[in-house]
Amino acid sequence: MKIPKISLRGVTKSFGTKKVLQGIDLDVAAGESVVVIGGSGTGKSVLLKCILGLMRPESGSIKIDGEESVGLSDGGRADIMRKFGMLFQGGALFDSLRVWENVAFGPIQSDGMAPAKAKDIAIATLGNVGLGPEIGELYPSELSGGMQKRVALARAIARKPEIIFFDEPTTGLDPIMADVINDLIVKCVSDLGATAVSITHDMASARKIGHRIAMLYDGKLIWQGPVGDIDRSGNAHVEQFIHGRAEGPIQMQVRKL
Amino acid sequence: MTIPVVTILGRMTLAFLAAAGAITMFAGHSLRQIARPPYYRQQILRQMLEIGYYSLPVVGLTAIFTGMVLALQSYTGFARFSAEAAIPNVVVVSLTRELGPVLAGLMVAGRVGAAMAAEIGTMRVTEQIDALTTLSTDPFKYLVGPRILAGILTLPILVLIADIIGVLGGYVVGVYKLDFNDAAYLRNTLDFLQFQDVFSGLVKAAVFGFLITLMGCYHGYNSKGGAQGVGMATTNAVVSASILILTFNYFITEAFFAR
């Protein structure tokens, strides 16, 4: 069997007494797109940040291409980061830099590319997400939410990463722009032949960009399977979530009206 | 009733020690990262401009009025003992040893320390710092290191300029208001000035530059939540930098001049 691109075993993470992740096992094959769904505050972002190395899990193993990444030194971490691209929920664009400088940031600062060449790459990448070269001269604060997401996507793919992470890519966008972003994600991932891990609670997005869906609930992955099987999961939690029902086994932490 | 008091004291002591430890580790990590490549020269230059050049007006104004009031105030005292000749010396020694570095430090802490904490804090809460990491750029090298290095390098220059402007303020009041002979004023200023007076002030300035930028970066880097967290980080950066400046000022003075 081939080595999975990403392999998690028994990953746990807690904040104080709150156990956010309680033993996550997940394999993602090369070229596969896995979407992790789950309610707000179930630890989806924490899971991504653990895989990225922005947070250190308390126990468990996270292997990237078969190499253990938990507890790596700064140097080894930087090598693994080279394989990653990340689209942050709020975009996380550097507001002191122009759009093209944002997209060219990785190539210039980390790979030491000449700025002129990096600018060409940045403008080509902006073109891939449907933005013209004139956008490159603007500052992120001058763009709409949907355009910021596209710039953030361009920045995430500018270094042609092997693995791309998407943190709630469609949150805060209107349904049409959300679908545009979904299409771009599908296109970029397949053009690069990249492996993708997304987290979302938008089912339309999950169905569109995922090959496989996993549901995170109460710190564990309670169900995973191909995207086609999501409607016959036979799991009451999944059923409730994908149909967005207030009644069911998942109880929100709110007082009854 | 004594137990709650002890509990509170213990908790405060622990919190203080934890913060001191965290800051020391933060400082150590930053200094190690400054020493190692890659060096972001452009960032260092931009920060030097921000800390030094743009602080010139406020520091210059502080210095000139301090020099002026020093001359005026010491005249009212010294005239009683017919010791007016000591005024130029009092002005220059007070400025170079103490007031130049401390007042410039406090002004820069308010101006630059606050701005740093707000900028880095906003970058933290909008995930821009995480984004730096995912682009294989170490935030300590790119954000923290250049700021701290610029602080250490720039503050001594700023203080040297403040010293000169302050002496000028004293000179203006001395010559035009107190009827000193202008040549005598300058001669008295320079004759009694020792190398150590200026040098100790510049050492202080470098230490203060380190403390201001360290506090700005530390509190910004560790800010949590949204706007409120960034606001708190800004306040903490200025308050802690000011207290540290005054504390370190005493100990550096003691190291230089206590016999």
Image: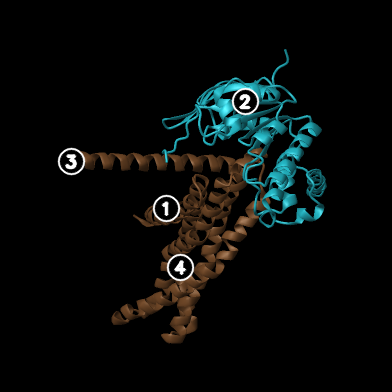
Chain colours: A cyan, B brown
Q: Which mark is residue A214?
A: 2
**Which of the chains bears the disc numbered 2?**
A
A125 with respect to B221 (left or right)? right
Residue under pointer 4: B193
Q: Residue B240 carries which label?
A: 1
Q: Is mark 2 on a helix, strand or loop?
A: strand
Q: What element carries label 1?
A: helix
- Disc 2 crowd, CA 10 A, few/some/many (<14, 14-19, 20+): many
Q: Distance between the residues labelled 1 and 4?
A: 33 Å
Name the foreground residue: A184 vs A25: A184
B89 with respect to A8 (left or right)? left
Return the disc, 3 or 1, that comes first in the chain's sequence: 3
From the viewer's perspective, is residue A176 above or below residue A160?
A: below
Find out whether the residues at labels 3 and 4 contact each other: C-beta distance under 8 Å: no
Task: Tell which tag, 1 or 4, sits nearer the viewer.
Answer: 1
From the viewer's perspective, is residue A28 above or below residue A142?
A: above
